[in-house]
Image (cartoon, coloured by chain):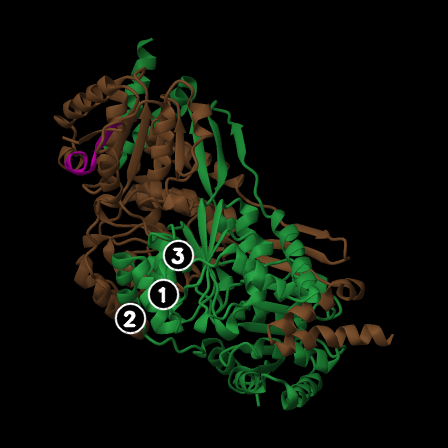
Chain colours: A green, B brown
Amino acid sequence: MPQFLDAQSADFEAQFQALLSAKREDSPDVDDAVAAIIADVRGRGDQALIDLTAKFDRLTLTADKLRISAAEVDAACAEVSAEDRAALELAAERIRAYHARQMPEDQSWIDDAGASLGWRWTPVSAAGLYVPGGLASYPSSVLMNAIPAKVAGVGRLAMVVPTPDGVLNPLVLLAARIAGVDEIYRVGGAQAIAALAYGTDTIAPVDKITGPGNAYVAAAKRRVFGKVGIDMIAGPSEILVIADADNDPDWIALDLLSQAEHDESAQSILITTDAGFGQAVAAAVDKRLETLERRKIAGASWRDFGAIITVPDLATAVALSDRIAPEHLELCVAEAEALSTQIAHAGAIFIGSWTPEAIGDYIGGPNHVLPTARSARFSSGLSVMDFIKRTTLARMTPEALAAIGPAAARLAQSESLEAHGLSVQARLDRLNRT
Amino acid sequence: MPQFLDAQSADFEAQFQALLSAKREDSPDVDDAVAAIIADVRGRGDQALIDLTAKFDRLTLTADKLRISAAEVDAACAEVSAEDRAALELAAERIRAYHARQMPEDQSWIDDAGASLGWRWTPVSAAGLYVPGGLASYPSSVLMNAIPAKVAGVGRLAMVVPTPDGVLNPLVLLAARIAGVDEIYRVGGAQAIAALAYGTDTIAPVDKITGPGNAYVAAAKRRVFGKVGIDMIAGPSEILVIADADNDPDWIALDLLSQAEHDESAQSILITTDAGFGQAVAAAVDKRLETLERRKIAGASWRDFGAIITVPDLATAVALSDRIAPEHLELCVAEAEALSTQIAHAGAIFIGSWTPEAIGDYIGGPNHVLPTARSARFSSGLSVMDFIKRTTLARMTPEALAAIGPAAARLAQSESLEAHGLSVQARLDRLNRT
């Protein structure tokens, strides 16, 4: 059973606080092991990758086999059914079209003082994409990470994916090909992150690493951060649905379960203006849990972290939603569009009952890599912006320097940074002499 | 003496690699001490701040004195000279005008399938700004951090600044007032970061923390990251000047020294097409070092990390510059504007001999918080973007879901995420029935 909360009950605030601060993830402390793996890869390069892959993935490689060859990718892609290929291609096309609109423009202008100012965006030269192995090896994640990088103009995109016992995932390789990934290596874990960050003879180093992974991968990303850029460290998935009584309880139940089935630590919350509807959704969830393939995972998530909150009005729902700052927010209410404009903190909003969150996981167009654990208060989902960076530009004329230079010299003096002031003053002196 | 390198010499690559990888910063390991301080502030709140401020800043406070009152700010601001005030106001106005242009626009459109897509930008609700005490307490940094936050629309901006022995810095307080800082607290160190992240009775928690600080502050920011957002952890300052022989060696010497005087770990590099000019700059640096107030710091930086590199042509200069990915890049060459477009990786570019880097530290308009330690390969300077976040939006119509839903259901199936598929299929089934 999930928790049932009533926003008008006396102890609601305490219950809601407890819900907000529930510790859902128990990260094992693997930092020492990861530090040793990184040091090993830095020291021994390819040979460390070969040894660690034999150990963790039960796969014997030689340096020339670290990279998955074009022929192997060809062969794997040929195994994919026409329907799956068409679905991946439609998803890729829609994700590409959405992200293409994110490219910001360079700017330049001349201001009143005569100074030329502006900035220019440039892509990261090389990026690395981590793809988990096994059950969590999702072709959709390959598209969601690789396409923004390629839209941004990243010249070299290297993917790493563990292949336990040597088994390749055809859909993952096809997604990589469709997305334009340039190189694919059959290595995973902290050793793959180390290789991307520091390079080996076979794998050239990259500047930025993105993609999900287990505790080892997350710890390795934290460790190499600074040497390279990384994306966020994702926590377990979350969904918040705000729904009125004019919804099919089964639809809402399935939407809640679509996050719950990811992970026993996932969290699904329903906020509704109708307590009876909340009960109906709870019953629909229970019914679906009888047959769902992943009922063990989804059931545990729903039991331990699920919640149904009854609120007196939608304004209260919005206020609670902003305190949760959900990764995914579904608005299944009559005036969903208008309500969406009142939301201040959410990773992604799915507007109206015809927009199940799962559409956004695959094919809507927006990215499915989104801020978890209330971090939508201060961060955004993955985008083209993660693969570009801004260089600011300034150019003074002698006149512009004459206009604003004295203030700079004054401020430098007030901060006791004499050379700063002199570097301006020496130029001003030349102007004054002529 | 700085290093002299010649890009055409046989051992250049090894020397350049050594320059790139020189370890300039020795961060003391203060992580355990910082963890204890954070735990203390989380446990004891204001009283921990009071005790730690007594210990580290030799200042006895009560909870009602943690915040610097408006009257105190008034009194301190009144001490500032009219010239300093005017300089700060001009700087603020120019920084505000530059950053106002960074605000991105929301987007929404309807695509071919009939899906409404887009995104919306919203500000972080509350931000915290750390300002160091003592010598590194720079009013210009207050402007550079606070103004982007306020331009972004941050509702509550709380500043923390240690005041050792109770001494207030009038220029810092005036800069805070001009920039629109809402609250100022006289606490510093890891305890101030902990208070901003977790809150105390007096200091409400924030969502994002920016601003420079010592090793304790940096370690505390790393530790609270995730709970709140943080800006980059800045390393020692750097400047790269690319200059031809048509420059006054003294101007270039002062530009190099303006970074060297920040910190013994700062790095100043000149790349020039004229070896004789390089020698002239080296002589000019030595001459300035005879009298510079901060000659001890600047001299150590120049001796230990300074370099003058002679190149055969500007194309080589550009290539080396991109490998350095400098925080600050000055282009003092004839066709500086054209050359700037060839640079792929730099935090900020100062174009032409009339644009000393120090202009950008104070008054140019662009931000002076910039990526150090080669991180301009993958990150950008502080901007309005650091204080806003994107919520992606999607709205399907029944027709749009009919068009793209089947592909989503197919992909969900291929990833063995049954509830994902069912949440789409249940809606498609309704359409098929009607």
Subunit ID for the residue under disc 1: A
Mark 1 and mark 3 in contact (Cβ < 8 Å)? no
Mark 2 and mark 1 in contact (Cβ < 8 Å)? yes
Vertical relation: B373 (above or below) A318 = above
Instruction: Give amino acid for label 2.
Output: Ala
Q: Quadrant of the C terminus of chain A?
A: top left
Secondary element type, mark 2: helix
Mark before the other along the chain sequence, 1 or 2? 2
* Foreground residue among A250 and A73: A73
Secondary element type, mark 3: helix
**Between marks 3 and 1 in the image, the one whose residue lies nearer the viewer:** 3
Judging by the rendered image, the residue that carries numbered circle 3 is A64
Q: Main secondary structure of the magenta part?
A: helix
Q: Which residues are magenta?
A: B300-309
Mark before the other along the chain sequence, 3 or 1? 3
Secondary element type, mark 1: helix
**In the image, is B51 to the left or to the right of A128?**
left
Q: How far apart in space, not on screen, are marks 1 and 2 (Cα)? A: 9 Å
Q: Crowding at label 3, few (<14), some or many (≥20) Cα neighbours within 10 Å?
A: few
Instruction: Give amino acid for label 3.
Output: Asp
Measured from the top left, where is residue A311 in percent x and y?
Answer: 64, 78
Q: Residue furthest top?
A: A434
Judging by the rendered image, the residue that carries numbered circle 1 is A190
Whether residue B199 can be seen here: no
Q: Crowding at label 2, few (<14), some or many (≥20) Cα neighbours within 10 Å?
A: few
Q: How far apart in space, not on screen, are marks 2 and 3 (Cα)? A: 27 Å
Measured from the top left, where is residue A276 in percent x and y?
Answer: 70, 87
Q: Which mark is residue A383?
A: none
